[in-house]
Amino acid sequence: MNLYKLHSEPESMEYYGFHHDTVPALFWNMYKHDPNELKKRENVIAKDPEYAYMYATTILKDRFLLGEEAISKDFVYAHWYAREILCGRFPLGEEAIAKDPIHAYHYAKDILHDRFPLGEEAIARVPMYAKCYAKEVIKGPWAINGKTYE
């Protein structure tokens, strides 16, 4: 069924004019149980961080090298990819992860098991995470931006 034909102004609708094979949000549910069909669309999936991550975790259950560039641009998917797929560091995604206090803290604590200098400025923006970082990652006092956290 073509829902665009039922709308009085179809051009105002999201994804109007796009072929369903060019937008992962339009074809994912149709093919999520058919890895062969998704494989045909890997080049499209690889450009979207969310769908590249989902493809790696639910279809490949392994690295998706073609999609790592896109995944690396989104701090949420970069962190989850490091945790769920790589089970370790994701250097390509660290710049994005470092921008978000929550994900930077958890990346340091749960993945690096060590300091994450690139993410420390972001972590320091949220006192609760700064205290946890000092206690659980640094395991002692942590001074940053004129404040000390313990």
Image: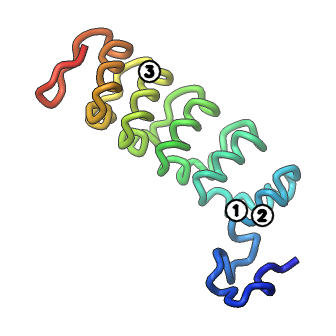
Q: Which residue is mark 2?
A: 27
- What kind of residue is marked 2? Phe
The reply, left or right, for residue 49 in relation to residue 149 is right
Q: What amino acid is found at the position of numbered circle 3 in the picture?
A: Lys
Closest to the observer: 150 or 68?
150
The picture places residue 20, in percent across and down from the top left corner, at 76, 72
Please, which residue is most extreme toward the left here?
Answer: 146
The residue positioned 39% from the left and 19% from the top of the image is 114
Q: Which mark is residue 144?
A: none
How far, Cα to Cα, is label 2 from label 3?
Answer: 36 Å
Q: Is residue 77 above or below residue 2?
A: above
5, above or below 100, in the image:
below
Q: Residues within 10 Å of mark 3 (few under 14, many from 20)?
A: some
Of labels 2 and 3, earlier in sequence is 2
Tell me how far mark 1 sits from mark 2, CA to CA: 5 Å
- Residue occupying image coordinates x 32% and y 9%: 139
Q: Which residue is mark 1?
A: 24
Residue at point 45%, 37% (across, down):
91
Q: Is residue 142 above or below residue 21?
A: above
Q: Compared to 34, does 13 lie above or below? A: below
- Does residue 16 appear left or right of residue 80 in this picture? right
Reading the image, the residue beneath label 3 is: 109
Q: Position of residue 70 (x, y in %)?
A: 54, 54
Q: In the rendering, at what x and y percent does residue 17 appear?
A: 68, 83
